[in-house]
Amino acid sequence: MRTAIYLTLVIFISYSEILAQRLSKSSVEKLSKSVFEETTLTGLKFRSIGPAQTSGRVSDFAINPNNFKEYYVAAASGGVWKTVNAGTTYIPVFDEAGSYSIGCITMDPNNANVIWVGTGENNNQRSVPYGDGVYKSIDGGETWKNMGLKSSEHIGKILVDPNNSNIIYVAAIGPLWSSGGERGVYKSVNGGETWRLMLGIDADTGINDLIMDPRDSQVIYAAAYQRRRHVFTYLGGGPGSGLHKSVDGGATWIEINKGLPEVDKGRIGMAMAPSDPEVIYAIVEASEGKGGFFMSTNRGASWKKQGNYSTSGNYYQEIVVDPKDAQTVYAMNTWIQVSHDGGKTFKVLGETTKHVDNHCMWIDPTDSEHFLVGCDGGIYESWDRGGNVAL
């Protein structure tokens, strides 16, 4: 059919050129318009050819703590989606914003209508798209306002102080393909209208993760990450990577790397146990095969290596602790890994009917057997701790 249409167009064009030599310009234009509109173009119609299968990397969730049926989904290359019926249907709510790539999403713990989005996927593969800073919605995703930090290009995490919604912390990873840009921990005390750099390492090191102590919002832990992407290689670490802590809302920081590998480190993922905030985990990428899974029980003063398990900082290196059991930890990976002994050993959770490449996980705080997982194949939900999943 395409060949026939092409030949028809060639014939019409050639015929028009011949007539142009014999007819006036107005006559040719009138004839061409009539021919193309009435015979050729009316036969060309658009039709949908996809999507043919589930696709699109899911990078983060923001669930309403007072209504689990309402939540937002951040897609690494597909904007932000919202559901109010527990995932039965979703609507896109970020299509008019300046970036389609999302690294993280956060709901204000004091107001479910206030949503923060960090643009720019927080991974480092060749196909990773960049963003244009931080966005805020005050009407449940109906409208958005860009709140700055545009040169960060990739945002790893956003925290809102539960005691004061005007205080926001942002983990800015910085550009992937170049140095510079806005990198580090940024803080706003006026709802995002202005930002101040609280922790900056160097032009090649940004912050990929933040956690806040639920007992004291002045206590912040930050994971610094030095990395660079080139066409021919990926540099996934350096001397700038490591852990930092502040006890005064980011005004001052100390390094908390005692017990971690003393060689160059890469991406570090952190998680604090909701049932016991004294337990902090860190999954550490390091050179010379010295990476692994670490635990601190003294608020980061020192770390103890639990085991050798680690993942790829290029694409994973995120962990989630069971809200009721401080010893149960899930690690995002090609296949989700789970430990029931505080990270000493890990085993595959089991995903026989589920897409692989996992990047985020939400565990129901009222029922640890119920969770949502975001992966390269969309969103999956389980009510029996991964025994069975539904897309």
Image (cartoon, helix red, strand yellow):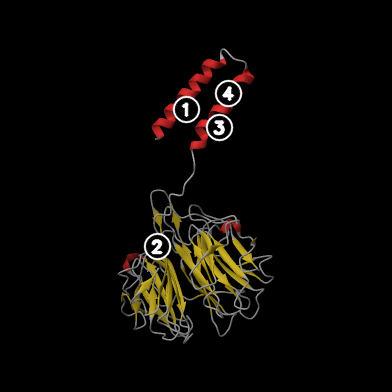
Residue 173 % position (x, y): 52, 62
Residue annotated with mark 1 = 9
Along the polypeptide, which appears first: circle 4 or circle 3?
Answer: 4
Tag 4–tag 2 contact (CB < 8 Å):
no
**Kind of residue sitting beneath label 1:** Leu
Q: Which residue, as the protein is rendered here, is positioned at the far top?
A: 22
Residue annotated with mark 4 = 31
* Residue at mark 4 to residue at mark 3: CA–CA distance: 10 Å
**Depth order, front residue of 25/349:** 25
Residue annotated with mark 3 = 37
Describe residue 303's horizontal placement relative to residue 100 as left or right. left
Q: Is residue 145 above or below residue 296?
A: above
Rendered image quadrant of residue 163: bottom right
Q: Residue at x 50, y 58 (%)?
A: 78
Q: What element does badge 1 sit on?
A: helix
* Residue at mark 1 to residue at mark 4: CA–CA distance: 14 Å
**Which mark, by number, is residue 377?**
2
**Depth order, front residue of 280/30:** 30
